[in-house]
């Protein structure tokens, strides 16, 4: 073979190799670009890998990935709301609380409530009582002395924050023939208590019956009758429903077969002895209601300046 022919053959071979190299380079660039455009697959620990055609653990040591079945609900259905509290009925009986429930309670009342605080064994709660106090005088009588200063019951109530307020007034008002004023004053008192203690459960305690024979023997007060007391209890229950607070039916707890307070419960027919004060406490402990159960959407609005009514029926601001 001549030298010139070998040179031409070598030149053609070099050209072929050059073309092949360029083609290979183009293929590599194309494949690399395609791979770069694919979305990255999530990395899965080896122990959670599953065979492509079925279930099981490739490694043989870790549990397979649990995927929710198509038929399983992904969200829970909302639970039904509890029934709304029925303010037209007295508080229902429930499991008893202990005395610590009353740690943040204020007891607003007259001498009956004062006796309860002394003899029931409650041992806690704020005693905001005054002998002879009536619903008509709740916001004007300077009945309490604190650090040498005199305050009304409502002024004293505003000095601390309470979670419960127990209101028990009505016996001293039995001598007034002003049922309309009694009702209006109770509604105004509830409004004012709610304004002062917006996060408190307000309990209206129905009046405990009287023993009229004992009353006549001790004081002779003929105006203290169970007939009128029952009228007041009906008005208090109506006020509790209107203002959406809790009514406590203490009358039914203490009344006997003669529709009055048992004679042995009281020396004067009005104020309870120790055993019956303890019974009163036992009733309160089994008739409690939580604030959120009463007002799931917040308490009802209250007037900023409620009207009160005096014993003679005239209104005052």
Image: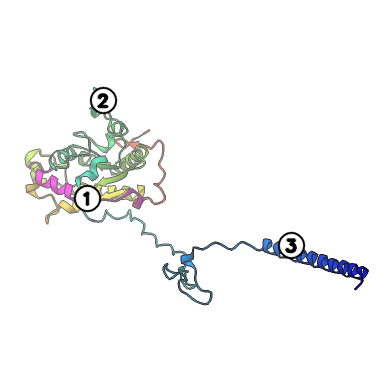
Residue 21 vertical placement versus 202 (above, below): below
Percent x, y of residue 215: 10, 42
Residue 311 visible in the current orientation: no
The picture quadrant where one finds residue 108 is top left
Magenta residues span 267-292
Count numbered badges in the picture. 3
Name the quadrant of the C terminus: top left
The colour scheme used here is rainbow
Task: Say whether disc 1 or disc 3 marks the residue closer to the N-terminus.
Answer: 3
Q: Position of residue 311 (x, y in %)?
A: 28, 36
Which mark is drawn over residue 150?
Answer: 2
Query: Which image quarter holds the N terminus?
Result: bottom right
Closer to viewer: mark 1 or mark 3? 3
**Badge 1 density bin: few <14, some 14–19, many ≥20, Cα 10 Å:** some
How far is the residue under mark 1 from the one under mark 3?
Answer: 80 Å
* Image position, residue 165 (x, y; %): 28, 41
Determine if residue 179 is in view: yes
Q: Residues within 10 Å of mark 3 (few under 14, many from 20)?
A: few
Q: Earlier in the sequence, mark 2 or mark 1?
A: 1
Q: Quadrant of residue 125?
A: top left
Does 11 sit above or below residue 145?
below
User: In the image, which disc is placed on residue 97?
Assistant: 1
Residue 126, above or below 241: above
Q: Residues within 10 Å of mark 2 (few under 14, many from 20)?
A: some
Q: Earlier in the sequence, mark 3 or mark 2?
A: 3
The residue carrying mark 3 is 29
Q: Tell me the element at label 1.
A: loop
82 vs 46, nearest the viewer: 46
Residue 275 at x, y percent in the picture: 9, 46
Identify which residue, 166 or 256, lies in the foreground: 166
């Amino acid at each position: 073979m001549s030298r010139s022919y070998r040179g031409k053959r070598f030149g053609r071979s070099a050209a072929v190799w050059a073309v092949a190299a360029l083609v290979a380079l183009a293929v590599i660039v194309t494949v690399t670009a395609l791979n770069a455009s694919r979305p990255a697959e999530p990395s899965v620990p080896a122990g959670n890998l599953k065979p492509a055609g079925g279930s099981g653990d490739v490694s043989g040591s870790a549990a397979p990935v649990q995927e929710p079945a198509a038929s399983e609900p992904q969200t829970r259905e909302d639970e039904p709301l509890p029934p709304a509290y029925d303010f037209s009925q007295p508080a229902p009986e429930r499991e008893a609380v202990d005395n610590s429930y009353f740690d943040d309670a204020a007891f607003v009342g007259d001498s009956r409530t004062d006796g309860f605080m002394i003899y029931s064994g409650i041992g806690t709660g704020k005693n905001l009582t005054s002998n002879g106090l009536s619903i008509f005088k709740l916001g004007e009588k300077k009945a309490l002395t604190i650090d040498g200063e005199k305050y009304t019951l409502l002024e004293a109530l505003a000095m601390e924050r309470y979670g419960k307020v127990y209101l028990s007034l009505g016996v001293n008002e039995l001598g007034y023939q002003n049922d309309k004023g009694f009702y209006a004053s109770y509604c105004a008192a509830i409004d004012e208590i709610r304004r002062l203690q917006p996060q408190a459960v307000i309990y209206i305690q129905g009046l405990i019956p009287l023993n009229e024979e004992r009353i006549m023997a001790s004081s002779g007060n003929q105006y203290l009758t169970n007939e009128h007391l029952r009228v007041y209890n009906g008005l208090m229950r109506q006020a509790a429903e209107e203002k959406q607070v809790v009514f406590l039916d203490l009358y039914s707890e203490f009344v006997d077969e003669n529709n009055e307070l048992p004679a042995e419960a009281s020396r004067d027919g009005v104020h309870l002895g120790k055993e019956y004060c303890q019974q009163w406490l036992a009733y309160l402990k089994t008739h409690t209601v939580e604030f959120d159960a009463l007002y799931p959407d917040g308490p009802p609005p209250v007037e900023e300046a409620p009207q009160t009514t005096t014993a003679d029926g005239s209104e005052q601001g």
